[in-house]
Image (cartoon, coloured by chain):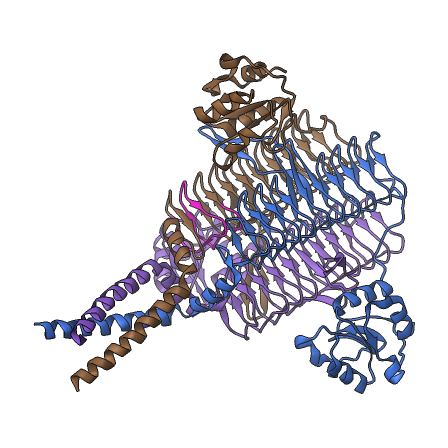
Chain colours: A blue, B brown, C purple
Amino acid sequence: MKFSEVIALLGDAATCNSLPIDGVDPEITGVAPIDTAAPTTLSYIEGGKFADWVEKTAASALILPADPDLQARATARKIAWIATSQPRWLFARAIAIFYQPFMPPPQIHPTAAIHPTAEIGDGVSIGAHVVIEADVRIGNCVCIHPNVVIYPNVRIGDRTVLHANCTIHERSQIGADCVIHSGAAIGSEGFGFVPTSAGWFKMQQSGYTVLEEGVEVGCNSAVDRPAVGETRVGSHTKIDNLVQIGHGCKIGSNCAIAAQVGLAGGVTLGNNVLLGGQVGVANQARIGDGAIASAKSGIHQDVEAGMVVSGFPAIPNKLWLKNAALFKRLPEIYRLIRQIQRRFNLEDLRSRIERS
Amino acid sequence: MKFSEVIALLGDAATCNSLPIDGVDPEITGVAPIDTAAPTTLSYIEGGKFADWVEKTAASALILPADPDLQARATARKIAWIATSQPRWLFARAIAIFYQPFMPPPQIHPTAAIHPTAEIGDGVSIGAHVVIEADVRIGNCVCIHPNVVIYPNVRIGDRTVLHANCTIHERSQIGADCVIHSGAAIGSEGFGFVPTSAGWFKMQQSGYTVLEEGVEVGCNSAVDRPAVGETRVGSHTKIDNLVQIGHGCKIGSNCAIAAQVGLAGGVTLGNNVLLGGQVGVANQARIGDGAIASAKSGIHQDVEAGMVVSGFPAIPNKLWLKNAALFKRLPEIYRLIRQIQRRFNLEDLRSRIERS
Amino acid sequence: MKFSEVIALLGDAATCNSLPIDGVDPEITGVAPIDTAAPTTLSYIEGGKFADWVEKTAASALILPADPDLQARATARKIAWIATSQPRWLFARAIAIFYQPFMPPPQIHPTAAIHPTAEIGDGVSIGAHVVIEADVRIGNCVCIHPNVVIYPNVRIGDRTVLHANCTIHERSQIGADCVIHSGAAIGSEGFGFVPTSAGWFKMQQSGYTVLEEGVEVGCNSAVDRPAVGETRVGSHTKIDNLVQIGHGCKIGSNCAIAAQVGLAGGVTLGNNVLLGGQVGVANQARIGDGAIASAKSGIHQDVEAGMVVSGFPAIPNKLWLKNAALFKRLPEIYRLIRQIQRRFNLEDLRSRIERS
């Protein structure tokens, strides 16, 4: 389709575009990254170190930030463009014009093993070799990819997608519009063992896991259930791959939890919390609304709302940046101290001589 | 059932209870966490920051520590209680009174693909779409959930449970009373590549993995087999989710290994070792009996029996706590040094003037 | 077979052997680790702390380094030996003489669910309950173990092995001679969410993942696909278990990536890069050819070719070793500073007195 049609489909999010300037209206056949874009594709630049790609990209059209210089450079190269304060968001919407994700048709594969007590909604797709145990309830338009296993008494909300080879354990409650990626385990047993003189005593995990609506859980992540009560992930929280959510965690809404994060048992996150990759949070720690922990932080204590923390043990990010810079200079600092000490002793000696 | 009946079922582990004090004997229908307990449930308090919940909980009965004050506060609120030196253990036993974990009936699902040379014990449950290859031997009362794959020549001991979508690789020996959680890989190929001038040369992993009796392996964890010989996990050792056990590791008995721990090749752990979440242990390191590594520790060297280590590189915990506190004060320390230096130079100048 | 036959099969990689010295030519029935080797087995010693095993091992033959002393000690114990500059490599080749990995016969199991549009090469083995979606093309002699799921439009090269319970997502291109281990997810959706005032906006992941020839991906690892363009892993790169490769990463050839490493989005690795266990690399960072990051490093910035980095944030390894040593001595350093300060103030006082 013509770039002008793409603009029309994107609606009013953009501030201005190149069409009134030079009228170049290329045919757009798809979307592409800036560095490997071919002619007839649309790409985007957010600024920063990608800005200079405007001189090199082969894309026929670009989504640009509100940067007149960048826009002029695009125009000079006969690249059509549209500008917005949020290029990445507009590009995300442009992808959706050209790409339809794979979605199998609504049908139940004959090899699926479905318990007769399970209730299945309308328009559901159930792939080959799926197993659904007793008393499971599946909402409408749910998509269950092949080889998924659902233990008894699970609830799955409307339009939720379960990718291949994931496992949903007993009593889990998954809301509407969730996505569970391949290999993830939801509602698996919490790691609950009580030390006794006779060894570990296994605490039965009688609780369950709740994922509210719009939650995503990445590949091979695990969201354990607790001994009693629930583990809860709030609505629209997004969890990346290989993340561990321990038993009894309470996670608020709209959080983003990057890959390989580990939350120990009973951790509480507020809303809009961001955790970088490989962050660890200790048992029972509480992290307030809007707090941010940068990658690899190790959080042992409560973090107040809105704080940005880094490091292990985690401290305020600005302090950590200073300390990390000084840490690099530890050998220099140590030399300085030794120098001072040596000169001081010299002085000391001199003063003693003078005193004598 | 009545609280007095619960007490009778729990046996003689408790020191005293409220029945002789005020005779309140509530009906108990289940177990619950202290903060969300409803009437007719039993909960527990270990002390610490949870102690004040005794004033707010709606639970009808509590397991309490040997703390007369806490007991009196419960009695004042007409909450029945039982006291013990190990509230969490007693609560674990109380859960087992009210909760029976899901266990499918002993039957072999018709869709399971079982090699004719496999030997299956009595009372075994084999779920839908399970695959069992040649020369596998399964003990009695084993429970294999759906979509599990067992490669050739594997041994599974009595009463062991294999959760959905886990994979047991060739020649693995899994003892009695083990639990392998969803997505775990047991006996998978070790990461063995020899660098040569022609690139990586793959070392065939001809060894096997042994899990002794009572071992648990968490969701999506991997216990690799070695090139030659065995990887061994000692009896009653508990391994959490997303843990990596490298080829040729020897792990003792009764260890607890928290989520996302990684052991490189050839690591040796003694008995009763505790590793916190996200700990890493380098190739060939040896950790003695009863040693503890706190979360996120990075262990490059041997750790003596009974030591508690922290940090990266791991050092004795007490030293690490001091250092971590000083690390936070590095900017202050640096300012101090600069002050000293400046004042010292001043003095130095003065002394030179005096000398002149 | 006789040790002399083993030597003949190993070819010309060895520099010398014990046969001309004492003519002892034992029967060899297998390969074993040095510490548990039984008579009639072949083992190896690389040197270092394993050297003293030459006095204790029960192995009948050894692969030794070019170390005349070690060779003499073996000869003295009537152990036959062969010497080489690369004992581990020669041992890897010796394993391949005695061990044939499990490989199911080329046949398609009747329970596999294969879309009629899929193209399957010659000599392919497809296990029970495998699912192959539309427009997939499988090369010759590919081995697909049970319960693997392949989404639409995937390409799998000749002789590649897919282990049980792994998932290959839409449009992935897997080259020849690759190995994907159990539970791994290839081409899964990148973690792409744009923050907006209305919450997270999901960026459709329209790209795909390419694994070039000879790549291995470990158990439960994930190699995500990007929103646009490709994620690429270069030829012969080896990836261990539980590794996260974010969307849009470009990884060169012959890299080795140890367990639990996490690469955020858009990371670039050159060729021959080595990343130790639990390393994390931040968004868009570039790591040059031949660079090495030791275990648990946290890399926020570009790393030049050939550099060795350690720590978090990662700094040159030699500096890190110094700093880590000084970090242990922080309490001592702090005491020193306080001493200087106290004595300095004393001096200061004295000088003021003198001045008065």
Q: Is the magenta stretch mostly helix, strand or loop?
A: loop
Q: Nearer the viewer, residue C158 or B246?
A: B246
Magenta-span inclusion, residue C172: no
Relative to residue A44, is residue B137 depicted above or below? above
Picture quarter with the C terminus of chain C: bottom left
Let me know if residue B289 is in the magenta part.
Answer: yes
Q: Quadrant of residue C260?
A: bottom right
Q: Is residue B59 left or right of residue A151?
A: left
Which residues, given as a range, are shown in magenta? B276-303
Q: Examine the rendering and report whether any part of residue B119 can be seen.
A: yes
In the depicted structure, whether residue C280 falls above or below residue A162? below
- Asked whether B345 or C58 is in front, the reply is B345
**Dividing the picture into quarters, in which one does residue B149 lie?**
top right
Tell whether B165 sits left or right of C58: right
Farthest-out residue, left: A356
Q: Position of residue B267 (x, y in %)?
A: 47, 50
Residue B28, position as x, y percentages in the image = 63, 19
**Residue C350 locus on image (x, y percent):** 18, 70
Numbered marks: total: 0
Q: Where is residue B233 in the image (x, y as percent from the top left)?
A: 51, 41
Out of C281 and B39, give the one closest to the viewer: B39
Classify B52 as above or below A316.
Answer: above
Measuring 80% from the left and 54% from the top, which residue is drawn there?
Answer: C151
